[in-house]
């Protein structure tokens, strides 16, 4: 397959998206571990929500296989929801 002038193996593209999506779902687990190690608190996680929104939008733009903004927005929204769910779980556990 020729994509943007480069020969790409479809299987390697599949594995790239498979692993990147799997890593995104580890966000709450990493947050809870950081909270249990007292490296960061839930309040600190909630206070940087603007940076999380910007970073998730950039990651969504990089990892989205197509060029439409809806797919990028959905991936960005999933990352933000995972981040806030991890911070909320840590807040409930610690308090």
Image: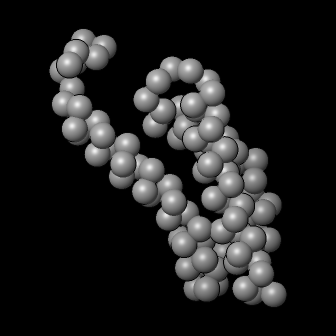
Pick the quarter of the image with the N terminus.
top left
Q: Residue furthest top?
A: 5
* Residue 65: quadrant of the picture: top left
Which residue appears at 69% of the width and 65% of the height? 85
Left or right? Give the position of 8 relative to 61.
Answer: left
Q: Where is residue 51 in the image (x, y as percent from the top left)?
A: 70, 48
Pick the quarter of the image with the C terminus.
bottom right
Which residue appears at 71% of the width and 75% of the height? 89
Q: Is residue 23 shown to the viewer in this render?
A: yes
Q: Is residue 41 shown to the viewer in this render?
A: no
Which residue appears at 75% of the width and 53% of the height? 49
In the rendered picture of this protein, how many numbered marks are placed on residues? 0
Left or right? Give the position of 67 relative to 1.
Answer: right
Q: Position of residue 52 (x, y in %)?
A: 67, 50
The answer to whether 23 is drawn above or below residue 32 in the figure is: above
Q: Which colour scheme is used?
A: one colour
* Residue 55: quadrant of the picture: top right
Q: Position of residue 88 (x, y in %)?
A: 75, 71
Left or right? Give the position of 14 relative to 82.
Answer: left
The answer to whether 5 is drawn above or below residue 56 in the figure is: above
Q: Where is residue 22 in the image (x, y as percent from the top left)?
A: 43, 56
Which residue appears at 77% of the width and 78% of the height? 91
Depth check, front residue: 79 or 51: 79
The answer to whether 91 is drawn above or below residue 51 in the figure is: below
Left or right? Give the position of 24 relative to 69.
Answer: left
């Amino acid at each position: 397959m020729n994509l943007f002038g480069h020969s790409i193996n479809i299987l390697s593209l599949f594995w790239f998206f498979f692993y990147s999506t799997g890593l995104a779902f580890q966000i709450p687990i990493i947050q809870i571990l950081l909270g249990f190690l007292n490296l960061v608190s839930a309040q600190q996680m909630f206070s940087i929500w603007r940076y999380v929104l910007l970073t998730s939008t950039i990651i969504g733009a990089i990892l989205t296989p197509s060029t439409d903004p809806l797919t990028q927005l959905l991936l960005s929204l999933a990352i933000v929801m995972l981040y806030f769910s991890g911070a909320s779980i840590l807040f409930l556990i610690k308090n």
